[in-house]
Amino acid sequence: MEPLTWTGPLGELLNPLIRSVTFVFLIAIAVQVIATIALPRARGFNPDGTIQIHFMTNIINQGVRYSLYTFIILLVLYLVIGATLGASSLGIIGGISRQLLPIWVSMVAIFTASIIFKRRLGLYGKLFDSPIGMTGFALVIFWVLITVLAGGLDLVVTHDELSQVSGMKNKLPGTPVRGAEAGEYAHYLLGGDNLARDVFSRAIKGSAIVIIIAPAATLFAFMVGITLGLPAGYYESAPLKFKTRGFYLTSGIVIVFCVLMFAIAPIDIAILLTILSLLLIWMLLRTAVDTVISFLANLILAFPVILLFFLLVTPEIVKTGLPNYMAMILFIFPVIFFGVLLNARFHTRPDIRWWIVGGVTLILFWFYLSMISEIDSPVYILPSFMDAISLPSEILVVFVSVVFVNSPTVFRIVRGLTLDIKTRDYVAAAQTRGEGSWYIMLWEILPNVRGPLIVDFCLRIGYTTILLGTLGFFGLGLESESPDWGTTINAGRRLLSVAPVPALVPALALMSLVLGLNLLADGLREESLKD
Amino acid sequence: MGMFILRRLSLMFLTAICLTFVVFIMTNLPPNLEKLAKTQGNFRMSDAEVASYLGDRGFNRPLTIKYGEWLGVVPSYKIEGRDGKIRSRCSAHGPVKDNTINYCGVLQGYWGQSWVFKEPVANVIDKRLTRTGALMFWVFLLMIPGALILGVLAGMREGSKLDRTLSTATITTTATPEYVSGVIFIALLASSKFGLSPLLNSWGWTEKRTILKGSATSASKDMPAEYDISFVPQFLEGLWFRLIDAPNVENFLLPVLTIALYGMGYIARMTRASMAEVMTSQYIRTARLKGVSFRNIVLRHALRNALIAPFTVIMLQIPWLLTGVVIVETLFNYKGFGWALVQAASNNDMDLLLAVSVVSVVVVLLTQLISDIGYVFLNPRIRIS
């Protein structure tokens, strides 16, 4: 079998075309950039007030526009021809486009539906008014669809991402698979890596880990940040008063905790914890809750992310069960958040209050227990038949550390927004109505800061993706054979100057996803500012 | 002002204490100690041997005592090991000599002994930090002017074609983490089989097999003993060697470019936002109506006010660069501070790790302090109360 070229026999026809168009486009862009400094704008005004169109600038702008359009049309042509005719006529690009056919169909369907109904879809629909937002959305939805269709339904991949085929080690893109049987895909579309696995299938499969963990971890970080940031920004006075019920309750908890520590921990640690607890109570009596949480947040923020990862995400630390204990603390926040959210809304409706609040909290609490409880870990609370979610320990440690790193920043953002919003009139109105403070925080302030939070959520998913890649790059957390992008880059970087493709493909994949998220955030910000 | 700095410095001190204690707890967890014993002794040690190895070196004592020793407020241990030698922290966990002192911690200026590099931690940090300093010098030289020029050009006419082009470029660089851009650069410029190098070589434009080197090891070499440059004063020769002589375009451009690009995008976007805001302000409109040329408005009127906000951003960007430094030094094999961090962390070299975290925490908090103080000086409308 012949190895595939990048663009196959049809490429000889199309390649010179796209090459010349690219050349013209780049030249036009360069000329335009110089022209914006040297020449006047395309549209100016004559002394009598009529519009004057500047000839040269206009021509340059038109040149850029039309060469860009031609370029995009040619690119689409490549993909369409590739998707219909496949690898035999358009080489590797054709083969990849053919494999991605389900993705193209779904993307076209989503875009058509969204553009038709965009006026009825709120902020999401407005995204389709800005080209930047649309580009970002296209990149993001591309990877989401790949995760769903390739990770869930096994549609796109050509080979198993873990199986090794002898003789395919570090082979170039388009190499035919040695001894491929009928029904198997005949080529390694993007070559083989240093363990003779298919680079294309690994990059496709690797998206699932990022696409699932990054938004989920960001969501948890937002839960932590919001639950702590709202009260930190809202309350101004000390949360505890001397000789009140809250004071006795807190003191009771602290005393029980200290006694427990004296029983199980070494004596010096127990003394230290007792001093810290007393300090905490004293702080809560003297200053606002903001001081305590902000100090802790700044403490985490002062710690370099990379050092934290190296300390937290190692097999030795996993052995001590520290990630499980951290998960116990971090994962409780969504339960608290939703419990308080619903309670604040429904505490005036005694007829349904306990059904809704209690029911939701119980279900979430069961999810919480099944997330933190794992067999063979120190936290093994729930019997295995009730354990709905079973996270492998290496995923858990990555997840927990990423949430831990992101939470303080989200906390700072929410706190800052709350400090700004709480001076508004509608908050004062709610206070005068006698609403509870949690109702004001969660149902008056939070909905009004959703704009900046949604934008930051998009950006933060991108940042979390970069963090996950960093972890993989240092070989921390996930197993070395895992197909996720960071780990694959790490495996490929050792042979980078000889065989760059195995590292280059996941690198570009990661970059395109993060770029998509950044553009999406930019589009959302632009569109939400227009209101 | 004096009170403000004093308060911030004491907060910094408190933060450093808390964080080093956390690092201390983490590195002294039993599995980590076991790893240390096995990497320093041998990997086939039995549990009893591990216990006696750790016991001889004073690791099996309460955590707070050990931390006190590291701080230098508790006298160092003196334990007679099972082999009959008396060891102490002050003799680098080796046999005690006559002149061994009792207190040796940070307060006494002793940072401990590195297990990996087999030399005092202070020496390791000193040597590695100078190398990273050289890297950062070139990064800043490239990044800050580049980012400011891009940001000002994009922000002076918001929404123009130039703005759109530059904004797209800066968004792309912020979406490209160091390990991605580094990989792309090496594949494009430093590979003998792919990218531009074989192309230019076949055209006969270059003699070398690769345009640039994919490794910066040669830029981190030690200064030769007979190193002497006639036109540079003696005391500056070390600096000259580290900054100018050892690094060259071939081995240093790619690492510098890799770090600079990621940071550049963010600073440029902030500069653009600040510039765009200034350009809409009243006094700029007044200047325009007076008939000042656009060039003069940008350079004389807007620029100074537009550069206040980026100053803070640049200062706060420095801690973020640390992650980039670690990635780039690993990728390009440049033996600096980040490389030492990776070595220390993967071998649980606790004294070195503690020193590394002290350095990074001080860098983070000091840059925050400088950015706050600098902001006051740059912006006379702000007063610290």
Image (cartoon, coloured by chain):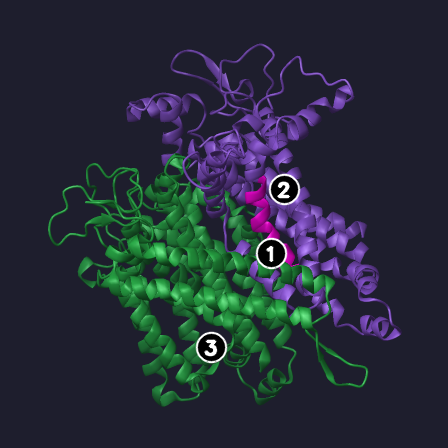
Chain colours: A green, B purple
- Between B131 and B84, the one lying in front of the other is B131
Q: Residue at x 60, y 56 (%)?
A: B266
Is disc 2 surrounded by few (<14), some (14 to 19) or many (20+) residues within 10 Å? many
Give the structural element (helix, strand or loop) at label 2: helix
Q: Chain of mark 2?
A: B
> In which image quadrant can residue A315 be found?
top left
Give the structural element (helix, strand or loop) at label 3: helix
Please tell me which of labels 1 and 2 falls first in the chain: 2
Front disc: 2 or 3: 3
* Residue B95 sits above or below residue A360 on the image: above
Q: Residue at x 42, y 49 (%)?
A: A507
Prevailing secondary structure of the magenta residues: helix
Q: Residue type at mark 2? A: Val
* Same chain shared by disc 1 and disc 3: no
Give the structural element (helix, strand or loop) at label 1: helix
Cα distance between the residues tagged 1 and 3: 26 Å
Find out whether residue A311 is within the magenta segment: no
Region in magenta: B256-270
From the image, tell me which residue sits under label 1.
Answer: B266
Q: Residue type at mark 1? A: Tyr
Q: Residue type at mark 3? A: Phe
